[in-house]
């Protein structure tokens, strides 16, 4: 069963936000997504972008990580569900990582403590190979 975007109805603008997010390979902030939409000639307010991204997150249709200053970055959640990512601190490159051990651990912690509907966030950050070799890193 597909979850809907809470709250409110799906409008053309909200659908456009989701469509553009789906077309992007990397995590992006609401401002970056808004700029991308503007560059594509899609007129939508920044507030609509923020609300839609929050709705996608709540509906389980977007993955979220935080950058080095704590800003939320979004990416469409792939059909195979919840994932964890390795994120380059410099260029923003992201790669999904195997996380079965984390999922098993989180389930066990919930069961051991009597918690239900447990949610978790695991974020690994570092420098990708390209950024390690780049001049800003001294390479």
Image (cartoon, rainbow, N blue to C red):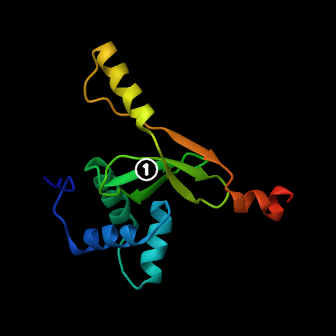
Q: Position of residue 66 (x, y in %)?
A: 52, 47
Relative height, residue 123 to residue 5 (above, below): above
For this view, does 116 lie left or right of residue 119? left
In the rendered view, tell whether residue 116 sits above or below residue 66. above
Residue 109, position as x, y percentages in the image: 37, 20
| Residue placed furthest toward the top | 113
Q: Residue furthest left?
A: 1
Query: Label 1: which residue?
Result: 64
52 relative position to 65: left or right: left
Looking at the image, which residue is at 48% across and 38% down?
122
Q: Is residue 33 above or below residue 7?
A: below
In the current view of this chain or complex, which residue is farthest to the bottom? 41
| Quadrant in the picture for the C terminus | bottom right
Above-or-below relation of 118 to 84: above
Which residue is nearer to you in this view: 136 or 128? Answer: 128
Query: Is 24 placed left or right of 52 in the picture?
Result: right
Q: Measuring 71% from the left and 63% from the top, which residue is drawn there?
A: 130
Number of marks in the image? 1
> Helix, strand, or loop for circle 1?
strand
Q: Residues within 10 Å of mark 1 (few under 14, many from 20)?
A: many
Q: Relative to residue 109, is residue 70 drawn left or right?
A: right
Q: Position of residue 137 (x, y in %)?
A: 81, 56
Residue at 38% across, 33% down: 103
Q: Quadrant of residue 93?
A: bottom right
- The quarter of the displayed image where residue 113 is located: top left
Q: Position of residue 35 (x, y in %)?
A: 48, 74
């Amino acid at each position: 069963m597909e979850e809907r975007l809470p709250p409110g109805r799906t409008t053309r603008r909200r659908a456009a936000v989701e469509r553009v997010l789906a077309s992007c390979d990397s995590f992006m902030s609401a401002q970056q997504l808004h700029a991308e939409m503007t560059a594509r000639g899609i007129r939508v307010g920044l507030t609509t972008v923020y609300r839609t991204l929050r709705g996608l997150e709540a509906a389980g249709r977007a993955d979220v990580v935080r950058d080095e200053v704590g800003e939320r970055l979004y990416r469409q959640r792939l059909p195979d569900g919840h994932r964890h990512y390795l994120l380059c601190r410099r260029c923003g490159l992201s790669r999904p990582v195997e996380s079965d051990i984390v999922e098993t651990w989180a389930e066990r912690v919930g069961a051991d403590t009597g918690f239900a509907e447990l949610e978790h966030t695991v974020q690994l950050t570092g420098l990708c190979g390209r950024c390690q070799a780049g001049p800003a890193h001294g390479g």
